[in-house]
Amino acid sequence: MESFKLALRNALRHRLRTGLTVLGLVVAILAFGLLQTVIDAWYAGAEGASNTRLITRNSISLVFTLPITYRDKIRRVPGVTGVSMANWFGGVYITEKNFFPQFAVDPKTYFELYPEFLVPPEQMKEFLRDRKGAIVGRKLAREYGFKVGDVVPLRGTIYPGTWSFVVRGIYDGAEKSTDTSQLFFHWDYLNESAKRTMPKRGDSTGVYVVRIASPDQAAEVAQAIDREFRNSLAETLTETEKAFQLGFVAMTEALVVAIRIVSFLVIFIILAVMANTMAMTARERTSEYATLKALGFGPGFLGRLIFGESLVIAAVGGAVGIALTFPVANAFAAKMGTLFPVFNVSPETIWMQVAAAIVVGCAAAIVPAVRAGRVRIAEGLRAIG
Amino acid sequence: MKIPLSYIVRNLWTRKLTTSLTAGGMALVVFVFATVLMLEEGLRATLVQTGLWDNAVVIRRSSGTEVQSVIDRKQAAVIASAPEVAYGADGEPMVSKEVVVLINLDKRGSTKPSNVVIRGVGPKGLALRPQVKLVEGRMFRPGSSEIVAGRAIAQRFTGAGLNETLRFGGREWTVVGLFDAGGSGFDSEIWGDADQMMQAFRRNAYSVAVVELASADRFPAFRERLEDDPRLTVEAKRETVFYAEQSELLANFIRILGLTLSVIFSFGAIIGAMITMYAAVSNRTAEIGTLRALGFPRGSILTAFLLESLFLSLLGGVIGLLLASLMRFVSVSTMNWQSFAEIAFRFSLTPQIVMQSLAFAAIMGLLGGVLPAARAARLKIVDALRAA
């Protein structure tokens, strides 16, 4: 206890230096937390995926579509309890910068398969009635100020022309990890127009969403679906929704890896700063340590003193850094808009921040503690900083 | 009267641990800063090299990417007949009508699929891109199920090596040649015969038309002609511009993320330098007093400490750059968000990046050193001498 008090007082001896070190720690821990959260956001789509949903797509790649006739065939596969479809629209809202996903879906079945998209019943009814209607996510609505009844014009990149949709409903996410930055509209509307302008593109959809009774059947049902269409004009590839989403993440894995490496680099940078502070402190106090030794205190006591001081500084810096992570993450999420549909600071991130602060505090004290332990009394007393 | 440089250098040398820790922190910051710039530069170089200034790419209006574009045979014929188009030695227009699709291929040693660009090219496809050279095997024979693969693809994807086969579009395709596109985006593509691709993928339209212009300055006339033609709903872009735009989103993301991080990290490094320099000043108070008593003016003291901080940061900067230069041997591949296709590129270090990184390090050193140096310069001789 005495040594702790002494460590605390030691930490406050050089106010400016301790203050600067704490500031550096705050920045580093904050940056580390934000980077970890960015990585989490990358995986958010996969995290929010259900185990009882499969995605069936064209085996060549997502660029190729599947005929609409597959729908009934998939429904007849044993183990399948529901089928819906979604088609990537890829429209541009005013300018390319305003990116958000838009899907042409089968309105009745799609929302049955995605119970986490909560739409008020009366809005749902309105949406089903209006062929040019659309349902948008809460986050998207907030970002662009969409209200029920607003008209959203989209310039098609895959389907040429300007398309107008009337917002008929706004959905909320059942959980924090639910993506509420999407826009859904009637597949029929897309199909009718597509058939008129480019007949070859009609009567097809990008993916089928398949619901199965239990997650154990996923592999079996997926194989059964793919077997059904083998050697047809459009062979399929069926995988769980999670695998499908992770496939997207894997394509940009290099970036995720880079961010991960950088997030650990920041810890090393702050470790260098912190270790420097402790090294200088110990160096200046060489004669003091010699005095303590002369009084009969052992190397263990000196070690406790140095570790205590280092950990106190690291703890204060870490605590402030963690506390700041939440408001900064919220501000960052607001700024990024719909680029990161889900941006939440996870409990794991907090634990990693705590661990990082402790590791930095301990590691910074090692060399000075060893040195102080080895100081010879006669030399130490003679030392000048 | 100036304080000799050797005094400054020896001060850094005496406190080796502190110097190396501070410089080490700076080195890491400079490393991050430099690698981000190198990555962005590498991406830019890859995509800019992909195009030629006197080539033009014609895609369907507002489709944005080659994969989303559709140009039917009639439109392609109209484009090919434009008078601005160059003619080859055989009297044919220098136009390649191409089919561009994405297919999923597995990376070697994993089952994670990536999107790879398959480009069905016309007879003039190779002639339009002089940077693409066949390095192994031979070119595909028109009208056959043969393909040639870029070197970056052949290394990384299962079945894309020489004499291996790939299955897509309901057929087996044999890789009969490998080409080197000089580090451009074509290195991440697979090429075959356009008509065969159309059959395999059951399409009756091309994706893009790539043309060589008779002279580069006729591009505005060419663009105007296509845009005014009521039979066409297309837009024309210079090939260099087209590919640079394809990477805009990714390049911006890398730059914004990287620079934000560099600024945050540099904050930490500046604090590190400041701590070191403040300590140096307080340790040497008596020394500073002696120097002043010997007749060195305040300005010299200020300069000496600033220079010390500057040396410290430049040392870190040089180490960081050396570390970063090792990254040149690393190749990165990721999905380009705009074209959804896999693209491979390298970190590229240019003299400009070296200068920028060193300047960045110097600024960090000066910012970290200015307050402590000012404190040192303000010390009164009497007080300083008494501090010993």
Image: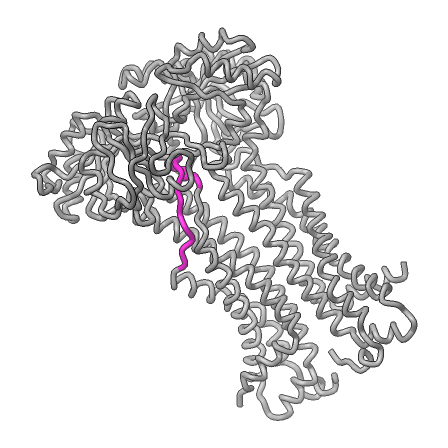
**Seen in the image, is A186 located left or right of residue B118?**
right
Q: Nearer the viewer, residue B228 or B253?
A: B253
Determine the residue located farthest toward the left in the rendered image: B91
Determine the residue located farthest toward the right in the rendered image: A296
Q: Classify B146 as above or below A132.
A: below
**Colour approach in the figure:** one colour
Q: Position of residue B377 (x, y in %)?
A: 61, 81
Image quarter of the C terminus of chain B: bottom right
Residue located 43% across and 55% down the image: B38
Q: Is residue B338 magenta?
A: yes
Q: Position of residue A40 (x, y in %)?
A: 59, 38
Q: Classify A317 as above or below B379.
A: above
Does the rendering let one see residue A219? Answer: yes
Report the span colored magenta: B334-349
Q: Nearer the viewer, residue A254 or B62?
A: A254
Q: Nearer the viewer, residue A217 or A21?
A: A217
Q: Position of residue B231 (x, y in %)?
A: 16, 27
Q: Is residue A344 magenta?
A: no
Residue located 14% across and 29% down the image: B77
Q: Nearer the viewer, residue A327 or B141?
A: B141
